[in-house]
């Protein structure tokens, strides 16, 4: 066990985690040279196209140091704030972390956030300064920032270029000398923590685990502590680039197990694997994830409802931060209310459903979770605006607030403050980290950052601002439920809880957008935005009219009037019984309202 090292790579977006992982794999010859490619661990097409890591990826490497063989278990983690739950799970399976900082960009918000996650788990931190070969590298300045952040010495920082491989060998020495080997008792009862899982259509659910105590042999009878069900270990092994079967795994090892489970609900990330005949107590797993953004996901065809359920179950195995429950909508039929960690997470889930499961879905307007307090003071949650009770029953509504950290250059402070104040934010603190970097702390309503905040922040700071946030608390707020009515009928998929000061603006935009997208009918369509019984915005789509007076030529005017009156009555009757189809693109357009 003393020759095993378990570590992860943590950093802000685009600081070179996947490139460093490539170099480590290349140097240890964990993969044949002909199979080597950039972003080797990012095995999803979506990750390669966007150039981001979405999933944590584990890989085992062999390395010989001073004639002694060592085993390295590396976990490459995502850098985006929406996937921080992946990072927390990767950290729980490690004893050390490589903290990567870009020499051209310096410390950014997610660097600090991920560092705190690692410190909470008592991990040994190895600071690494990456991209030293770049013309804009500020080696001395960024080294000072790292020393201020973690209190290390200058000689502890390893300057490397992950792209060219310069000085990467020094990282191996640091991993062996600084990161402690795993602790655990091989002779104790088996205790293994599940930190990830995936679904294979031929073999069922494959669980990834880290053994803390004991040993596991192929064919052993094991049980999962949370579900209490027993299974046979049909296959166990280690995580190379492909799964590599082994006969036995010991304490400190990271590996996988195939038990033939076909039902995805029988396995849970954070559960403990132990032997059926000699059980061990449950390990303290991960906190249950708290979704930030909620949206309805519905199949295009209502007959695909069960297929969508199966797809979400299988996706949840691979993405434990996805939460969902069934719901129905008058406009869209049966579907699911899903909880996400942010807008990028929502986008990725929607894209993965289409690519991996061939499910084309409709997504409703995203919103956050609120609490409403009734006249007796009872506090109840709302994650769907259509669940909002009658306003007469409501004492007040509370919305979630976040504490946001923005790190930027001093010349962008004014624009960023303007953006945050426009989003109902409040400046809490302003700290100069160096002459060219300033950290701003804001209290912001979560609902205001859901849509376009991140994109606008990047554009006004020309990409120089980094953003990270933590949940703060719930505060009373002047929120109202805005409904969209088509000919007097509510379309529940467009309902939204919104601050009173922004309701008119959003209602106006929605009505104008729907007027563009809805097709004209034989009768007039009134599109209204309303708060309770009060209409705050309206657009009208005029009817397609047939010229019924075309056959009247000459004669008395009363003949024309008679025909027009008859047409008017017909249109009125049509309007009472006619149905208005809302096209799929109308639901999609709502998500992009702020782009126009």
Image (tube, helix red, strand yellow):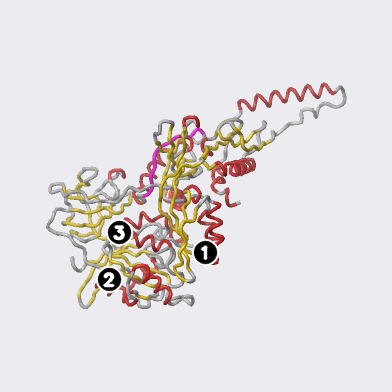
Q: Quadrant of residue 501?
A: top right
445 sits left or right of 162 in the view: right
Which residue range is magenta in the image? Answer: 321-330
Q: Is residue 32 visible?
A: no
Is 325 covered by the magenta stretch?
A: yes
Q: Which residue is mark 2?
A: 175
**Residue receiving disc 1:** 463
Q: In front here: 329 or 102?
A: 102
State the residue at coordinates (62%, 42%).
508
Label 1 near label 2: C-beta < 8 Å?
A: no
Q: Nearer the viewer, residue 472 or 185?
A: 472
Identify the residue at the far right of this view. 554
Q: Secondary structure at mark 1?
A: loop
Residue 387, horizontal then vertical, whole percent? 46, 34
Residue 344 point in image, percent of width and height? 46, 53
Q: Is residue 352 above or below residue 238?
A: above
Q: Is residue 430 magenta?
A: no
Where residue 291 sits in the image (x, y, percent)?
Answer: 40, 47
């Amino acid at each position: 066990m003393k020759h095993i090292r378990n570590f992860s790579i943590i950093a802000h977006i685009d600081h070179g985690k996947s490139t460093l992982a490539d170099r480590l794999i290349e140097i240890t010859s964990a993969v044949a040279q002909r199979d080597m490619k950039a972003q080797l661990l990012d095995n999803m097409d979506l990750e390669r196209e966007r150039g981001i890591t979405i999933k944590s990826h584990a890989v085992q490497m062999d390395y010989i140091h001073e004639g002694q063989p060592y085993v390295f278990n590396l976990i490459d983690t995502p850098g985006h704030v929406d996937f921080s739950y992946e990072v927390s799970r990767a950290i729980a399976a490690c004893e050390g972390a490589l903290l990567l900082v870009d020499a051209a960009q310096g410390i950014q918000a997610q660097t600090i956030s991920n560092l705190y996650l690692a410190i909470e788990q008592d991990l040994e931190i190895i600071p690494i300064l990456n991209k030293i070969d770049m013309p804009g590298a500020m080696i001395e300045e960024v080294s000072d920032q790292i020393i201020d952040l973690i209190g290390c010495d200058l000689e502890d920082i390893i300057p490397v270029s992950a792209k060219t491989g310069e000085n990467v060998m020094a990282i191996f020495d640091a991993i062996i000398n600084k990161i402690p080997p795993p602790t655990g008792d091989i002779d104790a009862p088996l205790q293994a923590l599940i930190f990830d899982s995936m679904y294979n259509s031929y073999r069922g659910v494959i669980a990834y685990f880290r053994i803390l105590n004991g040993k596991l042999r192929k064919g052993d009878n094991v049980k999962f502590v949370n579900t209490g069900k027993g299974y046979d270990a049909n296959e166990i092994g280690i995580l190379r680039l492909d799964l590599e079967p082994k006969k036995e795994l010991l304490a400190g090892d990271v590996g996988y197990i195939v038990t033939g489970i076909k039902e995805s609900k029988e396995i849970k990330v954070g559960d403990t694997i132990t032997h059926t005949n000699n059980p061990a107590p449950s390990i303290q797993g991960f906190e249950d994830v708290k979704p930030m953004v909620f949206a309805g996901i519905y199949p295009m065809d209502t007959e695909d409802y069960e297929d969508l359920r199966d797809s979400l179950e299988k996706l949840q195995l691979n993405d434990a931060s996805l939460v969902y429950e069934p719901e129905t909508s008058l406009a869209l039929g049966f579907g699911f209310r899903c909880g996400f960690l942010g807008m990028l997470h929502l986008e990725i889930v929607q894209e993965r459903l289409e690519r991996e499961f061939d499910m084309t879905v409709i997504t409703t307007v995203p919103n956050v979770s609120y609490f409403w307090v009734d006249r007796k003071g009872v506090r109840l949650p709302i994650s769907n605006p259509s669940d909002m009770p009658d306003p007469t029953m409501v004492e007040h509504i509370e919305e979630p607030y976040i504490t946001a950290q923005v790190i930027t250059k001093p010349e962008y402070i004014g624009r960023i403050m303007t953006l945050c104040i426009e989003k109902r934010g409040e400046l809490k603190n302003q700290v100069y980290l160096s002459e060219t970097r300033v950290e701003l702390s804001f209290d912001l309503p979560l609902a205001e950052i859901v849509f376009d905040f991140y994109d606008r922040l990047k554009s006004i700071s020309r990409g120089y601002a980094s953003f990270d946030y933590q949940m703060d608390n719930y505060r009373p707020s002047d929120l109202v439920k805005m409904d969209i009515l088509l000919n007097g009928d509510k379309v529940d998929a467009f309902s939204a809880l919104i601050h009173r000061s922004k309701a008119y603006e959003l209602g106006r935009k929605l009505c104008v957008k729907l007027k563009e997208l809805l097709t004209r009918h034989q009768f007039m369509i009134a599109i209204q935005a309303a708060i309770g019984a009060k209409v705050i915005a309206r657009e009208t789509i005029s009817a397609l009219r047939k010229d019924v007076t075309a056959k009247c030529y000459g004669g008395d005017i009363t003949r024309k009037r008679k025909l027009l009156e008859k047409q008017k009555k017909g249109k009125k009757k049509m309007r009472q019984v006619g149905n208005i189809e809302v096209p799929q693109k109308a639901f999609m357009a709502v998500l992009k309202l702020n782009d126009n």
